[in-house]
């Protein structure tokens, strides 16, 4: 059994699939580790049924080793350690023509719109690979994709050393944003409701605000040492922080929308007018964010190993998803795709 197919009813079918012949520009990967993303959980729970083609192989947070090189591929060789940036852009739409292939109008998000990484052997376009430094831990490298999200958010915010930022929501992405913010030398506080997530944030050395019992606005003003945060990252997607986020920013501050908020949700736009705020949307990552994430992990500047709350073999993938689905204490579960 080398392939895990997700069905529409929260079950996986494990199959033995023969390797598919490589097309022009493709490589075959031996997938090492693949993290389970919040998006994967959404898919599992049936929130994205319209976009999925069940049964489907999902998974997009993979580290891997090149096992075979297809026709026309010259820049990679068998044995290279790599990660996959799972955004296959069309190259022709207005977004692509403007140079923003990561938000391509016809984006093929590999692992959602086409077959992903929860399989032992995976064919992908070589143009989407990023090489890992010699000797880099492949388990840690499964964090490149989510950390690249965080690096993109911090870069889009223009966050600088000594600026003060507040992260609303202390889940995996919130914590990775806090780590990426700290890596540029910014000060960070994390606002979160869950006691266990607050504890983890503190264990990682972050200043925290208990959104359930503290006055978040007063705490942000106080911690900023001025008139509010230089940058507010909204990662929770919940209505109360979204209503409050513009109040937390200083004059001419930036508010970065990270969470996916599918329904129109009230925002205090008077604050945007009054303080001349910028609201910045962010979605996935660009190639340079992948390079930055690899650099941060390889150098040890960012160490997300504390976020790992479970490791499962590919043959136990059903248990892995069930555990993430039912236990809110989980942060990041990693799947060993060779096991
Ligand atoms: Zn992801
Ligand atoms: Zn495009």
Image (cartoon, rainbow, N blue to C red):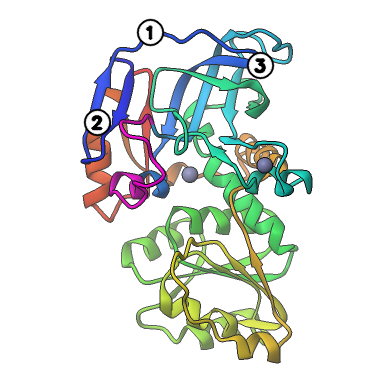
| Rendered location of residue 210, percent (x, y) | 40, 76
Determine whether the residue tagged by mark 3 lies in a helix, strand or loop: loop
Q: In this view, does 286 lie above or below 70?
A: below
Q: Tell me whether circle 1 and circle 2 mark residues in contact (CB < 8 Å).
A: no
Residue 25: assigned label: 3
Nearer to us in this view, 30 or 105: 105
Q: Distance between the residues labelled 1 and 2?
A: 18 Å
Along the line of sight, the residue nearer the viewer: 135 or 236: 236
Q: Is residue 311 magenta?
A: no
Q: Dot 2: few (<14), some (14–19), or many (≥20) neighbours within 10 Å?
A: many
Residue 312 is marked as none
Tell me if 260 is positioned left or right of 250 in this view.
left
Vertical position of residue 28 compared to residue 284: above or below: above
Residue plotted at (63% across, 34% down): 298
Magenta span has 42? yes
Span of residues in magenta: 41-57
Image coordinates of residue 30 in percent, x first then y, are 48, 16
Residue highlighted by disc 2: 12
């Amino acid at each position: 059994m080398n392939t895990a197919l997700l069905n529409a009813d929260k079950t996986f079918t494990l199959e033995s699939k023969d390797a598919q012949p490589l097309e022009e520009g493709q490589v075959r990967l031996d997938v090492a580790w693949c993290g389970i993303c919040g998006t994967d959980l959404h898919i599992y729970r049936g929130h994205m049924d319209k976009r999925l083609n069940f049964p489907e192989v999902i998974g997009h947070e993979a580290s891997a080793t090149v096992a075979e090189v297809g026709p026309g591929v010259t820049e990679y060789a068998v044995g290279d350690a790599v990660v996959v940036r799972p955004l296959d852009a069309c190259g022709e739409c207005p977004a692509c023509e403007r140079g923003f292939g990561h938000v391509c109008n016809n984006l093929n998000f590999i692992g959602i719109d086409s077959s992903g990484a929860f399989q032992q052997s995976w064919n992908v376009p070589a143009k989407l690979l990023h090489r890992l430094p010699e000797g880099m831990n492949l388990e840690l490298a499964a964090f490149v994709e989510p950390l690249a999200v965080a690096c993109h958010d911090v870069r889009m915010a223009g966050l600088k050393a000594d600026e003060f930022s507040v992260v609303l929501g202390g889940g995996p992405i919130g914590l990775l944003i806090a780590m990426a913010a700290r890596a540029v030398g910014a000060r960070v506080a994390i606002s979160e409701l869950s006691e266990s997530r607050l504890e983890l944030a503190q264990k990682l050395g972050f200043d925290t605000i208990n959104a359930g019992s503290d006055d978040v606005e007063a705490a942000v003003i106080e911690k900023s040492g001025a008139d509010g945060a230089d940058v507010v990252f909204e990662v929770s997607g919940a209505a109360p922080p979204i209503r409050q986020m513009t109040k937390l920013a200083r004059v001419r501050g930036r508010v970065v929308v990270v969470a996916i908020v599918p329904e129109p949700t009230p925002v205090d736009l008077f604050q945007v007018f009054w303080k001349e705020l910028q609201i910045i949307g962010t979605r996935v990552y660009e190639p340079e964010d992948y390079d930055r994430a690899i650099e941060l992990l390889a150098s040890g500047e960012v160490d997300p190993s504390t976020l790992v709350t479970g490791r499962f073999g590919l043959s136990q993938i059903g248990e892995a998803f069930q555990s993430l689905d039912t236990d809110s204490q989980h942060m990041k579960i990693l799947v060993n795709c060779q096991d």
